[in-house]
Image (spheres, rainbow, N blue to C red):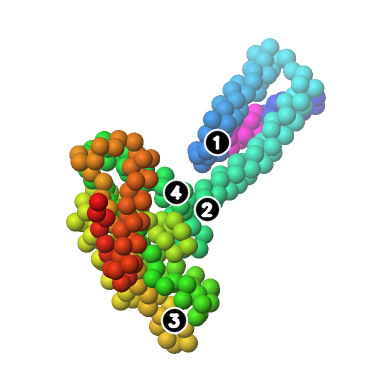
Amino acid sequence: MMIKVIALGAYYLALLAQVFATIFALKIFLKSKAYRLASGSLALGFGLMVGRRITPLLHFYLDGYYNLLDAGLAFSISVLLFLGLMQIKKIILELEENNFLLDHISKTDSLTQALSRLETFHQAELEIERSLRNGEPVAFLMLDIDHFKNINDEFGHPLGDIVLTNLVKHCQKELRVVDIFGRVGGEEFFVVLPGDDIGSAFEVAERLRKRVFSTPSALVGGKEVFISISIGAASFSPKMDGETKSSLVLRAFYAKADQAMYAAKSKGRNRTEIWTQ
């Protein structure tokens, strides 16, 4: 009689552990984003195993059959699977968090928190592809800090880093959420303005230039440090420009905005120039 009670108790505990494991696996599936196939397979597998744990109980009540060894193994297996699943949950969630951080690091400039060079170009190509589909223009700005080397030489590189970081903050206040703003060089930044023609791009560039010029970018010994920027602007229109490959469009208009920026520098700096043939 005692053996029967122990076997029955082991079967019930195995079933309980299996149900908890299934619920736990479902929670992992719902929380997981990158590993949904793996976590979903686990949840389904554990759910099916609940039936395996019910079967011995049905045999026990229908025909009085039980097996103490089988009951002990079922209980041990279910508990071990549940404990292992707890560790799997921890591993999956840590992996997803680490992947998120790595993805953020790869897409963001570590100093300024602007987009990284590669992510800037990636998003720029996506906007060009959208422009080619809907026929709307897309504008590009290249901006560079004037005499940035002098700032580093006079105040040191740590203050130069502060200037770069604050420049990004000043510019982002003037840009829309849909605009792309990335650091593509030491003190060079590239801006993509979806839907803007050259006239709108010039207005945006001037707002950026005026805000940066009128707002202190650092503070040294109680003294405010101001900088200026030179900006080059160019605009792509799929209705007027013949190129239909996004990578070639980006390469061409990146160069045009860059040339216009150097024209702004050659004409005295702290100004915006539009690319012309």
The residue at which mark 1 appears reads as 35
Q: Which residue is mark 3?
A: 219
* Residue drawn at x 34%, y 36% as measured from the top left: 245
Q: Position of residue 239 (x, y in %)?
A: 20, 39
The residue depicted at 25 percent of the width and 51 percent of the height is 277
Of circles 4 and 2, the one toward us is 4
**How many C-alpha atoms fall within 10 Å of the one at disc 1: few (<14), some, or many (≥20)?**
some
Whether the magenta-drawn stretch holds residue 43 is answered as no
Residue 126, quarter of picture? top left
| Spatial separation of the CA atoms under disc 3 and disc 1 | 47 Å
Q: CA–CA distance between discs 4 and 2?
A: 10 Å
Residue drawn at the location 50% of the way across and 75% of the way down: 152
Q: Which residue is mark 2?
A: 105
Q: Which residues are magenta?
A: 15-27
Judging from the image, what secondary structure is the residue with disc 4 in? helix
Q: CA distance from mark 3 to mark 2?
A: 28 Å
* Mark 3, other Cα within 10 Å: few <14 / some 14–19 / many ≥20: few
Q: Earlier in the sequence, mark 4 or mark 2?
A: 2
